[in-house]
Amino acid sequence: MRRVWTLPVLLLVVGGAAAAAPAAGGNPFEAAVTLGVFVLLAGAMSPLAFPRSIGAVEAQRRSAVDGRPVVFWRPGCAFCMRLRMRLGHRARRMYWVDIRQDGEGAALVRAANGGDETVPTVLVAGRAYTNPAPAWVRELVAPGRTTGR
């Protein structure tokens, strides 16, 4: 669990250090902006920016029932963050599996990607798509669409 918070905490520490110099130099505005940028980056790279993760087995079971896509991701992944941000509120219509916390999810991603843990990998109707276009994924979970199939 500590591993997923390493990058966000590191960003906060570096941001605090980077903001200390302008603050000591009498420039509180620059210090506040610098710290604010690092706080936003830390928040974006934290697990809090993503919907709650569930296990791969449970996600696949739920997906089989309602047809919603399953997204395999890991904290700190820029491509996962890109997908998450472009999905907006629609991200909650998908099942998210953190492969750092779920060994079965990591194994499924490796099986789909020739042994590599390339994320995001989106599972739709039993078929894996590696790093799909966010617009395509957004269409899968568009309002009015009943399933991801």
Image (tube, rainbow, N blue to C red):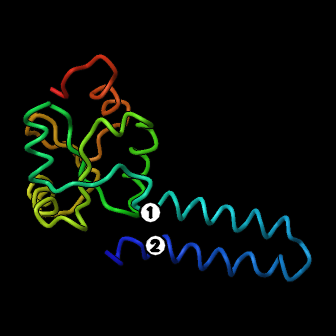
Give whichever of discs 1 and 2 has the lower sequence position.
2
Residue at the farthest right position: 26
Query: Residue at the spot x=61%, y=64% of the render?
Result: 39
113 relative position to 132: left or right: left
Give the quadrant of residue 19.
Answer: bottom right
Question: What number is the disc on residue 7?
Answer: 2
- Using the image, determine if residue 102 lies above or below residue 86: below
- Amino acid type at circle 2 is Leu
The image quarter containing residue 1 is bottom left
Residues at discs 1 and 2 in contact (Cβ within 8 Å): yes
Image height of 121 relative to 62, above or below: below
Q: Which residue is mark 1?
A: 46
Could you tell me the amino acid type at mark 1? Ser
Mark 2 nearby-residue class (10 Å; few <14, some 14–19, many ≥20): some
Residue 38 located left or right of residue 144: right
6 or 132, nearer to the observer: 6
At a point 11% along the width and 58% down the height, the residue shown is 114
The image position of residue 46, as x and y in percent, is 44, 63
Q: CA distance from mark 1 to mark 2?
A: 8 Å
Residue 35 position in % (x across, y down): 70, 68
The residue that appears at 30% across and 35% down in the rendered structure is: 93
Question: Mark on residue 96?
Answer: none
**Closer to us: 5 or 134:** 5
The kind of secondary structure element at disc 1 is loop
Picture layout, residue 52 above or below residue 74: above
Circle 1 packing at 10 Å, graded few (<14), some (14-19), many (20+), is many
Picture coordinates of residue 117, whole percent (x, y): 21, 62
Please name the residue shown 51% across and 75% down the image. Answer: 9
- Relative to 47, is 66 on the left or the right? left
In which quadrant of the rendered image does the C terminus lie? top left
